[in-house]
Amino acid sequence: MKDYDPATYGDRMAGIYDDWFGTPGDADAAAAFLGELAGPGPTLELGIGTGRVAIPLSQRGVEVHGIDASTAMVEKLRTKAGGADISVTVGDFAKVDVEGRFSLVYVAFNTFFALTSQEDQVRCFENVAGHLEAGGVFVVEAFVPDFARLRAGQATQTKRVEVDRVFLETTRYDTVAQRAYSHNIVMGEGGTKLYPVEIRYVWPSEMDLMARLAGLRLRERWAGWNRGPFTARSNFHVSVYMRT
Ligand SMILES: C[S@@+](CC[C@H](N)C(=O)[O-])C[C@H]1O[C@@H](n2cnc3c(N)ncnc32)[C@H](O)[C@@H]1O
């Protein structure tokens, strides 16, 4: 998608993000999982967004910092209770351009895939490794790509149907570059709104290789924040990497 850059997703989505994705149950489970690993911190969230996970984590007494490319998303974070106390660097999280070392660096909700080239994804792993304290961990939550959708080369899903609006997600896949180009579309009597998303999806195995290139290794992998077993049928994974 021409003109798509790291800030595009957040700048377009900020106004509706919490309404669509702000499920507290999942964020609380994430905060509990991350809080156990982090101790008192400090921790760093890549693509912190509106603080969906960062705020409940910080409310557990953990020091949280963030990076995000979208000032619109960060402004939403700032309006929330506890959001003003979290320091956020505006920038590209592939660079991890922040001072200090962390007991935990994490990237939730498929956000690692927002880095749209393999080069940036590898660079991200390397930069995270350089910001971990001794014994520190990097946690990634991401989906496992779905062969059925990829094979068709495209997919359209009806996400929500209301009396006067319909929410669709429509995607084209480039299975060579492992990229997906999507729009979340809201169609209603007042008009149509488009929310573009571009990602580079990877399987857990490629992610583990990126970790190895960065001097990290997989310590544990779960099907979700509640520590369900990860199997060949799992649609998501929560992976914990540590220094080798
Ligand atoms: C799906 S949202 C996730 C927000 C939050 N982590 C959560 O779990 O709700 C992705 C976030 O990553 C940010 N983002 C995407 N690409 C980025 C990049 N290259 N550098 C920094 N932030 C980026 C977006 O602005 C957005 O806030």
Image: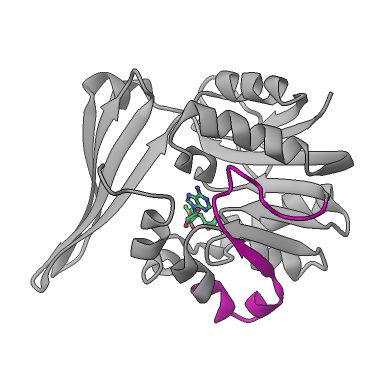
State the residue at coordinates (32%, 48%): 4
- Image color mode: one colour
Q: Is residue 156 left or right of residue 141?
A: left
State the residue at coordinates (80%, 64%): 63
Q: Is residue 176 left or right of residue 219?
A: left
For the question of whether residue 48 can be seen, the reply is yes
**Vertical position of residue 5 compared to residue 219: above or below:** below
The question of residue 81 being in magenta is answered with yes
Q: Is residue 160 left or right of residue 97?
A: left
State the residue at coordinates (38%, 25%): 178
The question of residue 43 being in magenta is answered with no
Q: Nearer the viewer, residue 195 or 116?
A: 116
Q: Where does residue 19 sit, x and y in percent of width and height?
A: 40, 69
For the question of whether residue 236 can be seen, the reply is no
Q: Where does residue 241 sit, x and y in percent of width and height?
A: 74, 32
State the residue at coordinates (83%, 49%): 101
The C terminus appears in which quarter of the rendering?
Answer: top right
**Vertical position of residue 217 compared to residue 159: above or below:** above
Q: Where does residue 36 sit, x and y in percent of width and height?
A: 82, 51
Q: Where does residue 26 sit, x and y in percent of width and height?
A: 58, 55
**Vertical position of residue 2 compared to residue 26: above or below:** above
Residue extent of the magenta highlight: 76-100
Marks counted in the figure total 0
The N terminus appears in which quarter of the rendering?
Answer: top left
Q: What secondary structure do most residues of the magenta stretch adopt?
A: loop
Q: Nearer the viewer, residue 25 or 200?
A: 200
For residue 174, which quarter of the picture?
A: top left
